[in-house]
Image (tube, grey):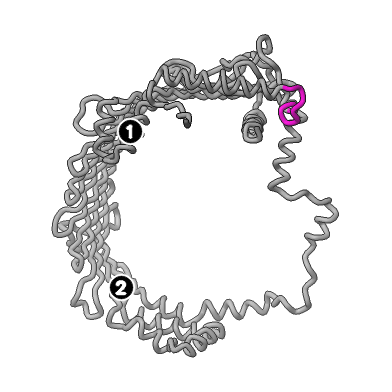
Amino acid sequence: MKRFVALLIAFALGLCGVCAGAESPTALPGEASTGWRLSNDITVDLAAYQSLMETLCPDPILLQQAKKTGILLNAVDPSLILLDDGIQLDIDLKGKRGLSVGGVRSEDGITFASTLLPSYVITIPIQNIIAIVTAVVSMFLPARRPASEAAVDSAPPARETGTIAPASRLKPIVAKAVTSPVLDRLSKCVVTSEPEYGVFRANGSTYDVRQSCNISGPNLHGAWESFVDWAFENKGIISMAETANKAGLEITAENAKALMPENILPQFSATTYSHSLSDGSFTTATFTNADGSKVYADARVEITRDTATAVLRLPTKDLEANLAMRQGDELWFMLDLRGREPLFHGESNVTAETLNGRLDMPTMQSDASLALNQIDDALNGQLDINAGGTYVGVTFDSRPFDEAAGDGLILTADLYYGAGAAPLIHEVFTMEPASTLTLDYTNAHKTLVPITSLVTGAGGYLPGLLTDLLINGLGGLILTLNTTIPGVIQPPRLRR
């Protein structure tokens, strides 16, 4: 009984949250309201689904459960009605009512009804709702104290004089940090030349401006040494190093400097060619070792008014990446990655109303393509994936439920697996305007039960309500299940 009452209380709290944000006047049960009905209909190709499960589930017990899941997906049609004064969940089985539960708000409180209780409705008066919410909140949040006590507690503790350094004492520290040798060395690492003007040929084109930029390894090494010297002037660093040295770790400034020897630091150099009176540029860049005998990476980037291309090579890793982009009536983008053999190739085209893309991974024997098309308020698309000889495809179409008013939504999706012509799963999601709940909340042939009577046991309602739940509610649901989808729900076996 406690679990049943707890479920009712949880549902009451959820309905309170829905109703609290309503903007329309409070409505009585049975009166028209405004809101949405959300429904989802799934159709499964059982023959194809069971064939797939036999491949994926070698265990016979798991296979049997998986097949039952497919049958349930094909039979169950859930829907949810959300109104500004109520909520209702329906689960239909092949068009027949299986289970419904919901509640509406009235001027006096909340009224619950369900097909699990054909002869009863349960009410919660407003004052009981407030008491329930207060009791639940008090379980998780501490009680608020008077404002006077809070003001006393929030007053900052008195501080001893001289514990905070005045701003004038902080300025020399900041100035010393900014003008430290580390920043001086770092500023010397990057050397940018003045622009040169003339006629320069590069990448098959002519430019009239050239400018270079260099970062030298020796200067980087000098910046690292300056940083180590600056760090080991800190008393905290010195104390930590002394503690570590007692453990035999030998952390010293000399050892820290040796972690980054000068001969392993790469040198960076780049040259940019451009036009002084028009758009367009071409840049080359390289990362090499200290003497330039070994190239770690090099890049070429060309930019015009409507296009951009780039090539990045990592010779030591046998990798090359090519990137291209073109802007016109549509945006075209390409990325190609190659090693000793092609690894990855992707292309896409984007316009105001369409998106098409393709992806190929030759080493994984996989490819994929995506297409999206939008016309007014409608959107449709298709995703195709081939992975190791296995095909998976998804098509979808989205449009307003009421195209004239632009209200609601109908989303249709199909999932294809393998070479079958028919979809493995067909799904239709609908969001349509709704104004009424279909559950019966009237008291003409139902017994009105206040929730306080269930909690206290007053009125003698509990035996009849439990009988109605077990015999008529659950019994009717099991009968409907076994009638619509026989064999999926097995009745419990009685021990002899």
Residue 224 picture location, percent across and down? 40, 81
Quick one: 145 or 400, which is closer to the camera? 145
Density class for disc 1 (Cα within 10 Å; few <14, some 14-19, many ≥20) is: some
Name above or below for residue 124 compared with residue 368. above
State the residue at coordinates (18%, 77%).
293
Residue 15 picture location, percent across and down? 63, 29
Write down the residue under mark 1. 64
Q: Is residue 231 rendered to the left or right of residue 485?
A: right
Name above or below for residue 304 compared with residue 235. above
State the CA–CA distance, disc 2 to disc 1. 68 Å
Please identify the dominant SS of the magenta region. Answer: helix
Of label 2 and label 1, which has the lower sequence position?
1
Quick one: 332 or 77, which is closer to the camera? 77
* Residue 65 visible in the current orientation: yes
State the residue at coordinates (20%, 63%).
200
Q: Which amino acid does label 2 sit on?
A: Asn
Name above or below for residue 466 compared with residue 221. above
State the residue at coordinates (38%, 27%).
73
Magenta region: 452-460
Residue 39 picture location, percent across and down? 46, 23
